[in-house]
Amino acid sequence: MVPTAANPGTDATTRLDRRVLLTGAAALGAAGFVFRPGPALARSGDLAAITAAVAEGKAASIARIQEWIRRPAIAAENRDMEAGADYMMALARDAGFTGVEKVPTDGHPGVFGVMDVGAPRTLGVYFMYDVKQFDPAEWSSPPLEAALVDKPGFGRVIVGRGAINQKGPEANFLAALHALRAAGKTPPVNLVLVCEGEEEIGSPHFRQVVTRPHVLAALRRCEGVFIPTAWQSPTTGAVQINLGAKGIIECELVVSGERWGRGPAGDIHSSQKANVDSPAWRLVAALSTLVTADGNTAAIDGWFEHVRDLTPRQRELIAASAAAGNEADAMRALGVKAWIDDLPWEESLVRLASQPTVNIEGLVSGYTGPGGKTVLPGRGVAKLDFRLVPDQTVEDCLAKLRAHLDSRGFPDVEINFTGGYNPTETAGDARIIRAQQAVYDRAGIHNTLYPRLAGSWPGCVFTDAPVSLPAGQFGLGHGSGAHAPNEYLVVDSTNPAVAGIEAATLGFVDFMYEMAAVS
C-alpha cells in the first residue's frame, strides 16, 4: 500500500503513531464523534498533553464564547464598536498574541497582533468581532444571554447572536492556543492575527487595516490566511472546502419626493394619491427594472459582461459536492421546498456557485406599525445586496447600476453604497487547502472542493494585490442560524457526525501542525 497523508504506511514508527492517534481519538469519542489527529501532531509527542489540556479547559472555553456573545459589537447600529475592539484585543492578548494593537480606519477600528515562536512557517488568521442585528422578540431565549440548551439531534448548544457567525468558531481557535500553552507547548507555526469590526456591513474599511505597512509586512510572511468556521453537515458530517467566495455590494436605493421633484416632501394623507405622485410606487418601478419578471435573474444593463463561466473542472467539483451532499438536509436548514425554477439538486448548486444575484434585504416606506395609517409616504428605501462572481468588480457594477437607472428614467433614485468587496479565488493546490483536506480526511470527515462560497467574506483583501495570498475557511463542528433568530453552536455533541467544541479545538491544533508539515 502506498503511504499517503491519510494512510501513512505500516513501518514501526507509523504503528507507534497510530497508537498515539487512537489514544487521541478515544479521548474525544465519548460524545459520539471520533476525531483522529494526524501524524505531524502524533510524532511531536505533544498530543496527550494537548488533549488533556483541551478537556481541562472546556469549561473556560464555553465561558469564553458566552462572555463574548454577551458583549455585542454591531456595526450597522454603531453599537459598542470601540468596546468590541477593546474586548477583541483582550482576547488576543489572553491567547498569547503580542504587539496587539487597535488599528484605526475611516470607520470602525481593526485589531492586529502576532505570535512569533520562531517557526519556519507563518499562518494568517482572520477574525471579525462584529455581529448582525437582532430582534429579541424572535428568539426562544435572549440573543445576548448565550443560553446553554439541549437541542434534539445535536446535544447541548449555545444559543446567541454570534454563536456560529463568527464568535463561536473563533473562540474555539483561541481555545486551541490556550490548550497549547496549558500543555507547555508552543504553536508549530507563527501566527498573524488581523481582525475587523465591519464585516457585517461589507468591510468598507478593512483594506485600510491590512495595507498598514507593518501589518502588510507581517501578512506577506504567511503561507495563507483562514477564518475559523464550524460548518459540518448535521446529517453526514461532511464539509465543503471553498476555493473562493462571491463578492458583495450592499447599498440602499432611495426615492424621495424632494429629490424627485414630484410627490410630497413628507408623508401626507393617502386620499391625496388621487392627485399626488407616490415615491413608494416609483421605488417599486425602479426595482422592477433590475431583475427579470420572476425576480430571479439580474437584468441590469451589462451586468453579465464580465461574468466568467464555470470551467469543466469547477463543474466536476460541483457534481461531486452534490453527490456527497444531502438535498433534504439543505432544504430543511433553509426552510424551502423547491429550488428556483424547480431545478434539480446539482443544477441548483451550479446556479448557486455561478450566478450573480440581486436581492432585496428590506423595504421601508411610510408607516409599518400595528394596524393601518392612511398616509402617502414621501420617501421609500430599499436595502439591497448584490453578490458578485469573477470577474465582476464592485466599482464596475456600481457604475453599471447607476447607468442602468439613469437610462431607465430614474436619475433621481439615490444609490447609497454602504460596503462591499470583490470575489475571491484560491488555487486548489495551495498549502492551506491541502492541509485542510488532510485534517478532514484523517478525521473521517467527507470533504469536497467547491468552486466558491455563495456567501461572502472579505477574502479578496488577502488574495488580491498587494497581499496576494491563498485564503479560505477551516473548522470542525456545527452551528446554524447566522443572521437569523436562535443562532447556535454545538458544544457537547450527541450527533456522531458532528464535532463538539473539544474535537473542534483539537481540529485547529491539528490544522496548525499540518500547516507546519505539509510539503
Image (spheres, rainbow, N blue to C red):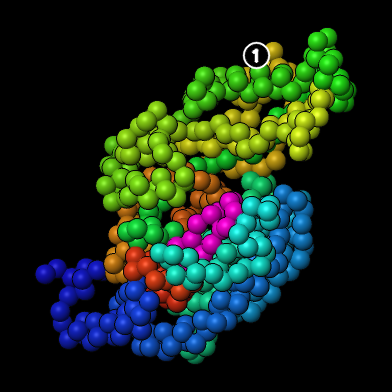
Any magenta on residue 485?
Answer: yes
Q: Is residue 298 left or right of residue 50?
A: right
Task: Tell me where the magenta segment starts and ends, as one range.
Answer: 478-490
Residue 378, x across and y down, in percent: 83, 24
| Residue 90 sits above or below residue 388 on the image | below
Amino acid carrying mark 1 in the image: Arg
Labels in figure, total: 1
Q: Is residue 519 visible?
A: no
The residue under label 1 is 408
Residue at left offset 68%, top offset 33%: 363
Quarter placement of the N terminus: bottom left
Residue at the image position 40 percent from the left and 35 percent from the top:
339
Residue pictured at 56% horizontal, 76% vertical: 62
- Residue farthest along the left direction in this orientation: 1
| Pick the front one: 166 or 192 | 166
For the C terminus, the image quarter is bottom left
Q: Is residue 44 left or right of residue 335?
A: left
Q: Is residue 186 left or right of residue 284?
A: left
> What residue sits 60% from the left and 69% below the top?
147
Residue 298, horizontal then vertical, whole percent = 52, 25
Q: Quadrant of residue 368?
A: top right
Residue 77 appears in view: yes
- Work out which residue is located at the far top of the displayed protein and give it: 275
72 up-or-down from 255: above or below: below
Using the image as rendered, state which of residue 196 and residue 200 is in the foreground.
200
